[in-house]
Structures are given as structure tokens and as C-alpha cells.
Image (cartoon, rainbow, N blue to C red):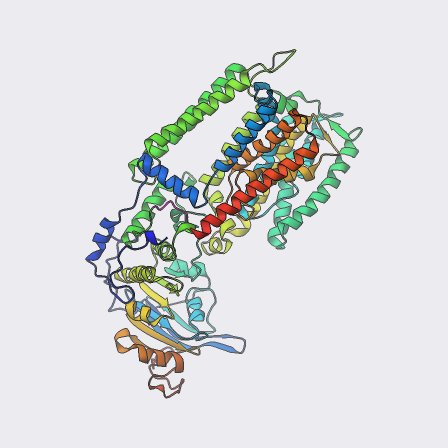
Amino acid sequence: MASVDTPTPSEPVTGAVADGEVPLEVAASAPVLATTLGGYLRAWLKRMRSGESGVLPVVGGLIILTVIFQTQSSVFLSAGNITNLLIQGSTFVVLGMAEVWLLVLGEIDLSVGYVSAIGAAITAIMIGPPHPLPLWFAMPVGVVVTGAVGALWGTLVIRLRLPSFVVTLAGLLGGEGVLIWLVNGNGTGGTIRIENNVFLDLTSGNLSLAAGWIVTIAAVVVFGGLIFLRDRSRRRSGLVAAPLVVTLAKIVGLAAAGVALVLVCNTNRGELVTLQGIPYAVVIVIALVVLTSFMLDRTRFGRYLYAIGANAEAARRSGVSLGWNRLWAFVLTGVTAGIGGMLYAARLGSVSNNVDGGTLVLYAVAAAVIGGASLFGGRGKMVHALLGGIVIATIYNGMGLIGLAADYQYMITALVLLAAVTVDALARRGRTTS
Amino acid sequence: MTVVAEGRPGGAPAAEGAPLLQLRGISKSFGAVQALVHVDLDVPAGQVTALVGDNGAGKSTLIKTISGIWAPTSGEIRWCGEPVSIRSPREADDLGIATVYQDLALCDNLDIVQNMYLGHEILSKRLLDENRMELTAKQTLADLSVTTVQSVRQPVGSLSGGQRQSVAVARAVMRDAKLVIMDEPTAALGVSQTAQVLDLIKRLAERGIAVIVISHNLSDVFAVADRLAVLYLGRLVDSGPITDYDTQRAVELITTGAANGNGAPTNGRGHHPGTGE
């Protein structure tokens, strides 16, 4: 720390600094701008050392898991399995994103597993016999219901100052009851079957080969262009910005990821029939990550969530409304969970009364935390849930491939979660002592 | 140096007119406890007024009254000569009174720009206008000669105590504060960082801003203050230009409420007569 202090306080305590010194001082310590690649890398290294490790640990963990599973089962990295893994992961990712809204605030929602299933059950009932309602109506209703449940939890937490952990623990218990009641009252044999093909296509439908290329190329061009223009305007205004090389590297990375996704998904993975193309579920998840990240990073609302999560009193004194912003976070958790529930029900083709909402929510929280969100508030991004959800899906999928059953799956997931929290705690320690 | 906010010429306060802030007969009681008893105080623009006193003398109560945390039980606050009532921190903010509390009220996970604009973000098309905020924040820091931070995009949690204090003060200045109240700004700071913060306080005054500094550290007070005001058991026992005091006299006033050690705290020495009521 001492290295960044004022270099020479000529008269330490009582001394008056003459006016004439000021411009000199400015000139002497011009702000260090990371405009060169070397400077950028040094600043990045410094951030890493001080605990801002970002997504590096989870990406590293993902690579290690991939190597392990691939050496145990050569099927793991096949195009078909990767696509399958992404579809499996979509539920964990979206439920993890639901948790991120609240984790940023330092709150938690333990009910998302059952609440998401309740939303899916309501939609499934509406689109089922005897009087099927249109999907465009039934799906929003399901999501509105889950959003309303979020608003209920939020109101209890904010108005009555109850801990969100306990309120949503009650939601976890009560939610299971409501789900069983809904399914037993409207389904047969403990499940509500979903026959609507459009709904099922959420996870089983694919973009055509050409559409996959077009959508991906359009996305890469748009986002690559936005990154390029933003960095260029920041460099020109003398603002803190990445050097040109880094900007270009980001765009190349984006394009490479896009091409890899299309190549993998466009490979025929069917055995009897042709099955190829990017699954709709993948498109939906990516679109959702982009939209929610935009809300967290670029709007006042998102900024306030981070501020409240770090120092609620400071936010309040700055004029931030704690109540409304927190309430909206609870509502968005409900809405996002509702969307996750739709993906879950579409993949299973039904909503059952024995959905394990308890495990689902733990996977959701684990996904966010493994990805890099903090349970203590103030830190977490949607992309963390994306990466963490893929890690969990990788374990789930890889264990299944090498023939290890649920016992090992749970134990390995537990170890990965512990590793993630340990990395977080060590990073935190690095930060406070820096 | 140019002034970002309003272009007020530095060091040229309205010396001839009424002082920026005048307190007349301010009293505050909490039940039976008299925290402030008939306090009269003038805070002129462009000067640093140090508010000193022992623990429990009423310093915090007084600044909380000025910054709208609670209303006085009786008495009058005049702002630019006009009687005002400050019923909430928001109203104080609207008048141009900014308070930098000891805890600084910063969010460690947000960067300097984000902290400076918290609650007052610049938007364009309903989205955060990061570029404009960063430019203005940089300019404000440069105007205050806060040059020790490496990047305005580093999280506030990674800054030193003096730098954090600078960010909190720059935030107040950027919002066009006319009076900045600082509660123990140098407590818990090392030697060079203390110098850095005292420097900053002087620059605020040079820009025509009135500054009230609460401090226990008399050497800091004598280094930076233009005026001294001494509270003792809720009464303002003395106030005046810093040149009227030396350390010994200040200590006597703080500890006994009177100079020359005759131990009569309520003899009204230095109490401004003929004001308020």
C-alpha cells in the first residue's frame, strides 16, 4: 500500500503545502494508464494477486474435469454428448442465475427449486387437456406466478425484516406441498404429462444448420462490434480501457467460441435419425445471460444491487431506495426461476410430484458460487452461474458416462463446491491484506 | 486550477455578507439529557472551522443537527443569512451540505467512479453513461490534486485510508457542496496519509467551500484550521480565529471549559452575546 502514497509530504503533519507545488505534483505522478499490452497484463496480474481472480478458477476447474472424464470415457467430448450436457446444464444455469440476483444483495432464495416446478406445473396444466390454452398465454402466466411468489418473499423479508434464509426455507417446505397438491389434483399417476410439441421443443428442438450459422455470426458481429466501438471510444477519450490487442483478442475469442459451438452442435448426433443443430435451450440460455448481465452492468438498478450488497447503509445515505431495489431483485429471482422451471419440465416432458426441489436449489446456489459469486453479497455475475452450471452439468454427465451413480455424483459435487468456496475465501483474504 | 462544478472562484468567499452558516441558540435534548445548550456558531465560506471538544461534548450531536439527521429542540439555523429548517439528510444535500462520516459510506466492491456517482448516476438513454461519469470524476480528482490513485477504475476496497477519504470528499465536492462536514478525517491514518488529507481540506477551503472538521488531534487542527470552536458539555465555550489560540489554551478549554484553568465552565466566556433570542 505504501507504494501508492503521496511520494514526498515535505512537512509531514503541520506543514502547509504551497500552491506552487500543486501542478508539479500532478505532473510527477500522472495516472498510470494501462494503454499498452504489458501495462494491461501487469494490472491484470495485480488484480489476480489481490483476489480479483474472476472466472479463471472455474475455467481451470472445468478444464481439469474435462480431461479427467475424457480419459475415462472417450464419448465425453463427442459432439452429441457435449450438446446433451449443455441441455442438461440449462436448468442449473438458469436456476443459478435466479440465485445471482439475490446473492449480489447478500440474500438467498432456498425455494427456487419448488417454485420453478410450480410455475412449470401451472403452465403444464393450462396447456393440457381438457381445454388446452395457447402456449403464448400459459407460459407467461407460469412465469408471472413465480415472479409473484418472489414478490411475496421479498415483501416478508423487507417489510417484516425476516431473514431471507428462513422465509424461503418455509417456501421450500410449503412449495413442495403446493407442488404435490397441484400435480395430484390435475395429473395422473403423480405426473402432469406435457404433450405440447412447441413446449417440448424448448429443449429438444434445434435451429436449422443455416439458422445456427446466421444467428451465431450475427451475434458475433454485433457484440464484437460493440466491444470494439466501446473500447475505441474509451481509448480516444483517455479513459481506462484495454489496449487494442486485448480488444481484438476478445473479439477473436468470441468468434472462436461461436464457431466452436456451431461446429459441435451442427454435427449429426442422431443414430437412427438425423439430429443436428444448436438446441433452442442453448440459444435461450445465452440470450438470458446477455439480457440479465446487461441489466446488472449497465442500468442504475444493477449498480444499486451491488451497492446494497456491499454496504446497504452507504447506499441508503446516497439516496438509493433499499426497499424497491431489493423487492425487484426478489421478483426477478422468481421470474428467472420460472424460466428455469420451463426448461426443466420440457426436458423431462412432464412435471412430477416428486421433483427434488431441495437438490435443485442446492445445485442452483452451488452453480452461482462455483462460478464465482459470493454468498456474502456484493459480488456475482450472471456469467458465474453460466460457468458454474456447466461445471455441475459436467460432473452430472461425466459421472453418468463412466458409470458412477448418484452417491459419487453428490460427493464429487460437494468437493467441487468446497474447492470453489475455498478459492473465494483465499481470494478474500488476499484482498483484505493487500 | 479550474473548478468543475460551478466555476466559483477559489478563495473569494462572500466575506462581507453573512457567514454561510449561522447557528443561533441551538439546543438539543434527548429526554432529560441536554446534549446541546444554546450553541451559537458562525461558519464562514472559504474557511476551515475546527470543532473540538472531549468525548460527549456534543460535537457529533451538533453536526448531525446541521446535516439533517435530527432537528434541534430549539434555536435557529441560517443558511446564507436566511433561516432554514433542515429536516432530513436529503434537505441538507439540497442546500449544499455534505457530510463525510467517519465510516466514509463507500462500497468496497464498486470502483472510484461508481462510488462518486452512487445515487446520482449520469444516464444516457436510461443506461449508465460510464464515459461521462469517468471523465467528470477524473477531472474532480485532478482539481483536488488527488493524484495518488493509480486508476479511477480500481475498487475502493483496494485503496488506502487517505485515498478513501479523498474519494469521499471528492464525491461531496462533485455534488456542488458549499459546506463539507468531516468527522474525524484523520483518525486511523498514518503520517503521510494524514498530510494528504489535510492538504485536501485546505484545497476545499481555497475553492470557497466552508469546511467543518471534527478532530481530536490538536496538531492536525492547528495545521489546517482557520477558526476554532470548542464544545464543553454541550456548550460552545469559545470560538474565534485559530490565531487567538495556542495548544495549551485549547487543551484547557477542551478539558475544563475555560481558559486559565479556573474551572468555571458556564461563565460564558467567548459566548457571543446579543444573538438569536
Q: Residue at x 49, y 21 (%)?
A: A260
Is B178 or A381 nearer to us in this picture? A381
Residue A200 percent location from the top left of the image: 65, 23
Res B1 seen here: no
Q: Is residue B61 above or below residue A79?
A: below
Read off the magenta span. Answer: B151-155
Which of the 4 quarters of the picture holds residue A413? top right
Q: Is residue A224 left or right of residue A33?
A: right
Residue A214: within the magenta? no
Residue most extreme to the front: A71
Residue most extreme to the bottom: B262
Q: Is residue B25 above or below residue A209?
A: below
Q: Is residue B220 left or right of residue A130?
A: left
Q: Residue at x 41, y 43 (%)?
A: A47
Q: Is residue A255 left or right of residue B177?
A: right
Res B67 seen here: yes
Is B55 or A29 nearer to us in this picture? A29
Residue A71 percent location from the top left of the image: 58, 24
Is A307 or B207 nearer to us in this picture? A307
Q: Overall secondary structure of the magenta stretch?
A: loop
Q: Is residue B174 above or below residue B52?
A: above
Q: Residue at x 65, y 11 (%)?
A: A272
Is B74 or B58 nearer to us in this picture? B58
Residue most extreme to the right: A189
Residue A425 percent location from the top left of the image: 53, 47
Residue most extreme to the left: A20
Q: Is residue B28 left or right of residue B98?
A: right
Number of disc labels: 0
Which of the 4 quarters of the picture holds residue B199? bottom left
Q: Is residue B94 above or below residue B256?
A: above
